Amino acid sequence: MDYSNFISQLLNGNPRAAARLITFVENDIEAAEEIVNSIYEHTGNAYILGITGAPGTGKSTFISTLIKIYVEQGKKIGIICVDPTSPLTGGALLGDRIRMKQYFSLDNVFIRSMANRGQLGGLARATEDVIKILDAYGCDIIIIETVGVGQSEVDIFKSAQTVVVLLVPGLGDDIQAIKSGIMEITDIFVVNKMDLMGADKKVAEIMQMLEFRKNYKYDSKDISKKYAKIELWTPEITKVNSKIGENFDELLGLIDKHKGFLEESGVISNYMKNRITNETMQILKHKLTQKIEDLLNSDEEIGRYIDQAIKKSLDPYSIANLIIKILGLE
Amino acid sequence: MSVDRKIKVLVCKPGLDGHDRGAKVLARALRDAGMEVIYTGIHQTPDDVVNTVIQEDPDAVMLSMLSGSHNALCPLIMDKLKEHGIDDVLVAVGGIIPDEDKAFLGEHGLKGFHGPGTELKTIVEFVKNNLKR
């Protein structure tokens, strides 16, 4: 298929072309390859903001308030909302848009819902490609809403410049705050629903956790460290009420502060390097898995190895080594 | 498989009508049939619907209407879709659609007209069999 018409329309800011291209990259990795190849030089201008948190913490409502503010600032905004795919039927119910309808205008807000299609980590396989399409489309800011996460869906920190984690009062105690996972990859903690009882307690718990981390802060300014983006920044915390937009001034100040930190410290170049490496790894994994699956399903020799394994004369590690040999990857 | 094509459906409620149980049940049934379903919520204007269709690029749009305003809103939605050059999307309306209105809506390109008591699998099959792409 020839995508050049869609791509030139995309670069002229045509929303329909953006939407069609997103569908192509979602459905077909070969199409994604071709499209990304053509638009890549037009990307890199958008600021990518990741919003994550447990189900029901108010991510969509929070984003809708952010959209309103950024629209007033004259920004063009792209929003990618990821919701989970059913492991049983492959279907999905994408309902994040419901909270975002009030500030909707075709010219400066582009919202796209995505099912994660079984991908773990809180994002969909095609999320990185969709970011690029919205970037080339001319968005100043791209907001990514992950699926409602538990503790270990941390992929967002590889894609986004700034990661905001939403918390709510009354969910989990101070032990939750010191667990591994999303609590470690957060740039800005936001206690949402600050009008509810326990909001200040939640803020205090997070602050204690951050104090602890401050003491262990790396004083090295070595920005080439793999996780420099996280290690050299002390996370900020604030509380908001997304429904009425309370305290968003402070929040926006913190986002700007983090953005400033990335640029001034030079960590941004390190982040870009890691992001591209990670993305390349993902693509390689996908391509190699494909090749190996095809081989496993069709190659007679490998079929015989598996028969031998059933008879216990060969084990799965040995089969894997034989396949690596067949693929010429030794 | 490098191609992972899913049927994407938009379920929405245009106009001033808050009764969305039917729309939610339908969204759930389409989800369980393996489709990716976007539910927009209630009180959608024709522009809201069309903007969502442009951005989400669904294969089908299911309008749930119980308010009696289908003859006013549905043709508006169809016209606006046409203005944007969108002619490859199945647009169906269901809910309370009197028999005498079906021909009029049909002339505007609307399909479906499933009312109360329709079995969910009938609607699932209808979507699968009437896609335009």
Image (cartoon, coloured by chain):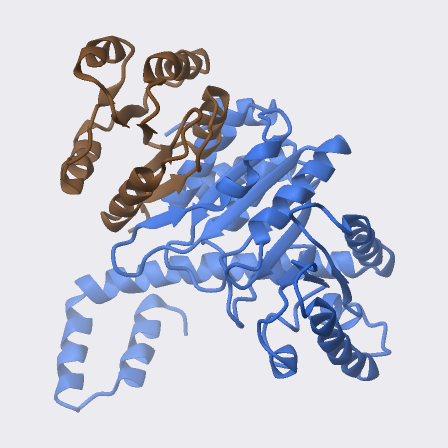
- Identify which residue is drawn at 43% across, 41% down: A25
Residue B9, percent from left and from top: 33, 36
Name chain A's colour: blue
Residue A246, percent from left and from top: 75, 49
Can residue A4 be seen here?
no
Instruction: Between residue B104 and residue A318, name the one nearer to us.
Output: B104
Q: How many labels does the image show?
A: 0
A318 vs A188: above or below? below
- Identify which residue is drawn at 78% across, 52% down: A247
Quarter of the C terminus of chain A within the rendering: bottom left
- Identify which residue is drawn at 44% across, 31% down: A20
- Identify which residue is drawn at 41% across, 56% down: A84
- Asked whether, in this view, residue A31 is left or right of residue A54, the answer is left
Instruction: Between residue A241 and residue A299, name the one nearer to us.
Output: A241
- Asked whether, in this view, residue A123 is left or right of residue A322, the answer is right
Furthest toward the bottom, the residue is A312
Q: Quadrant of residue A318?
A: bottom left
Name chain B's colour: brown
Residue A243, percent from left and from top: 64, 47
A106 vs B79: above or below? below
Q: In which quarter of the image is residue A53?
A: bottom right
Instruction: Between residue A185 and residue A310, name the one nearer to us.
Output: A185
Quarter of the N terminus of chain A within the rendering: top left
Can residue A182 be seen here?
yes
Residue A264, percent from left and from top: 87, 56
- Asked whether, in this view, residue A109 is left or right of residue B121, the answer is right
Instruction: Between residue B103 and residue A134, name the one nearer to us.
Output: B103
Q: Quadrant of residue A235?
A: bottom right
